[in-house]
Amino acid sequence: MADARSFAVAGGGPPQPPPPVARGAVGWARRHLFASPFDALVTLALGLLIAWLVPRAFAWAVVDAVWYAPDGQACRAATGACWAVVAEKHRLILFGTYPYDQQWRGAAVIAIFVALIGLSSIGRIPVRLRLAAWGAGASAGLVLLLGGVFGLSPVGTHLWGGLPLTIVIFVGTVAGGMPLAVLLALGRQSEMPAIRAVSVGIVEVVRGLPLLAVLFVVSLVFPLFVPPELSIDKLVRAILGMIVFFGAYAAEIVRGGLQAIPAGQHEAAKALGLGYRLRMRRVVLPQALALVVPALLNDIIRAFKNTTFVAILGLFDVLGATKVALEDPAWVRHAPEIYVFIFLLYLLFCLAFSRRGMAIERRLAARKR
Amino acid sequence: MPPAAGRPAFWRTAGFRATLYQILVIAVLVGSVAWMTDTARRAMQQRGIASGFDFLWDRAGFAIGHAFFVFTPDNTYFWAFVVGLGNSLVVAAASLVTATVLGVLLGLARLSGNWLLARAAGLYVELFRNTPQLVQIVFWYALFTLLPGPRQAWSLFDHAFFSNRGLLLPWPDQAMVFGLALLLLVPGALLAWAFQRLADRRRRAGRPLPRAGLLAVALLLAPSIAGWIAAGAPTGWSVPALRGFNFAGGIALSPEFLALYLGLSFYIAAFIAEIVRAGILSVGRGQVEAAETIGLGRADLYRKIVFPQAMRVIVPPLAAQYISLVKNSSLGVAIGYPDLFSVTNTVLTLSGNTIEAIAIMALIYLTLALAIGGLADIVNRAVRIRER
């Protein structure tokens, strides 16, 4: 007799017929699209939706779209998308208010950035060399944008804009935020109560605030607190705010990595006579950081997406420059097309980063086996 | 006299150094805060800005439009913060529910055996996770402002209208009664849950209750219906209708609200989908196979085996997403939705009390984040593994 508390069906139920074996496309469809009546219903509903949506989307984006309209006249009569607006405004979106004849410098910065992303995905190059390449690329990019040397005309940061500005903010955020994150994570693990309290306080308060609030505190409140002669550039202030926010979030990830390092590693290093700094730099941190690279990449992707927040502060990153482009009354009706364009632009970069993260995750998983 | 062999001088011991470092850190912190406060105080005196929180009781002098709460220029700054917080909470609560439902459905869809459904859900997640939330919000807003005007509004059976003024929906004349009925769903849910447990026990004992499912639904709705009848069973609905150039009646959801609501919901839903998927995948294959072996039905498999174990993995990152959603409701400032952040922005511009206004805002956001974190801890404790 079955146990009164058992979930099992007494006697195992009637015998079932053998599952149908079907090969080829029909078999595949039966298994993956029509496995049950509910599945068939879902497939049908989704299929109908796609059949309704795709032709319309295609007609809007390609067939009825206007690709060339120098003054916007041709777009007014069109029923499809007006991609001419992207052609008209792409320089403003990509480079902002940077002097028009100097925009090749911005293009060079974009090229350096893309090349460095590509370079970073080549596993055979040692990490140290890759970091050095990023350092060299970042310096070259800053010199290119700022000018004033090598016969380049100087361009103030208030004129920077578009994708180069987004890249500068992003790279600055990660480059400044990572050391801060490591410091805060080590501080939180410290045996000194005062250091621990300060680290915990900074991390928890910053993580409890919206990024916009942090940016406002750094760029609006901070200048009130320092004498005017010490006031710093608006762009630098925005990057500082981004660094603090990124650092607080990344610190928790680094802390996770630190906690995953077994106590034996610390003890072995101590037994060898390594002091705190050497122990952390040579033994603990390399292992801890390697563990959390995929999680850090998620935060880095978020930092890239969060660069758009500076548009609210009045900087002309890609989103800020787009808003300026849309102030033109001739093209204001074509905002969706422009947004689709920058949507794809951000998607491209974020997908590149996330694919990279997945590859690292696979490699780490393979190493564990 | 040199120190005894084997014992370093006191300034070289770890304990002394630790104390020294800590004193240094504290001194630098306290010093810079004191210096900065002094600078700020002097700068404010020069500009003639009164510091302190007395400004909260002054007349605000600005209006907050298209919102769920009435705010006129004669109200105080204090009330402006309350209205801003209210607007933030309304949009955050609505998005939180939508994002959770959508996220769970998408997470399950990505794991579905149906190829088409899994691919469609995957595409959604990749698209919405890998683009900035702010661009999404601004995109929705741009779409809504390009909708036809009220006279050419899209209508649904002449009861709901969608135009560049936003979405107009029918609304009960006595909204309070319906709000009460909604609230009474909570005791109803508790009743239904208790009944479900009883029915489960009977079913396992081989004496199932007849029509248990129907009874559970009835118990869920009973308190609400009783409350509605007790309030006189009001049935009046206010339906929006075109009067002149705009709509009257019903409830209006402004384009700003809708854009922020969609931007918050769709973005966070993509992240919740990934969390739910990871949670369900974390449940060991052996657990599912064991459940199938003892003949557990599909619904029981999920209810008794998969979800309780998946919840442990899901709750902590889910709470982080909820906190992020509430914090990012501050993006309403980009499209002119009067949330806490944009109201603070207006208040500090008009009153000049920058530091105080930002401090109030920061304190409110911190409290909200802590509250969500605390709730998550409670849930986490309820779903954790009870080890013997």
Image (tube, coloured by chain):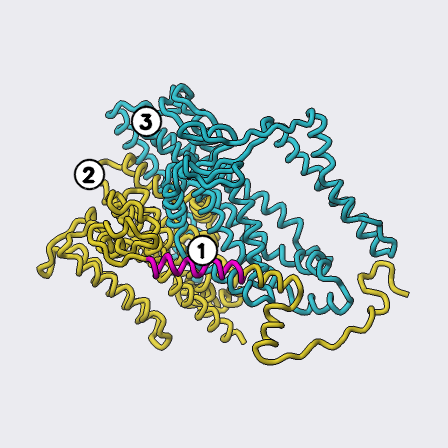
Q: Quadrant of the C terminus of chain B?
A: bottom right
Q: Is residue A155 left or right of residue A75?
A: left
- Between the C-alphas of marks 3 and 2, the distance is 26 Å
Query: Circles 1 and 3: CB distance less than 8 Å?
Result: no
In the image, farthest residue toward the left: A151
The residue depicted at 75 percent of the width and 41 percent of the height is B218
Residue B350's disc number: 3
- Between the C-alphas of marks 2 and 1, the distance is 44 Å
Which element is circle 2 on? helix
Residue B65: image x %, image y %?
41, 29
Between circles 3 and 2, the one closer to the viewer is: 3
Disc 1 residue crowd, few under 14, some 14–19, many 20+, Cα 10 Å: many
Task: Give the labeled residue for mark 1.
Answer: B128
Disc 3 residue crowd, few under 14, some 14–19, many 20+, Cα 10 Å: some
Task: Give the labeled residue for mark 2.
Answer: A229
- Residue type beneath disc 2: Glu
- Residue type beneath disc 3: Leu
- Between the C-alphas of marks 1 and 3, the distance is 37 Å
Colour in which chain A is drawn: yellow
Is residue B190 placed above or below A364 in the rendered structure? above
Q: Label 2 is found on which chain of the structure?
A: A
Q: Label 1 is found on which chain of the structure?
A: B
Does the magenta stretch mainly form a helix, a strand or a loop? helix
Q: Which residues are magenta?
A: A47-64
- Residue type beneath disc 1: Phe
Q: Quadrant of the N terminus of chain B?
A: bottom left
Q: Is residue A369 left or right of residue A142?
A: right
Colour in which chain B is drawn: cyan
Which element is circle 1 on? helix
Which element is circle 3 on? helix
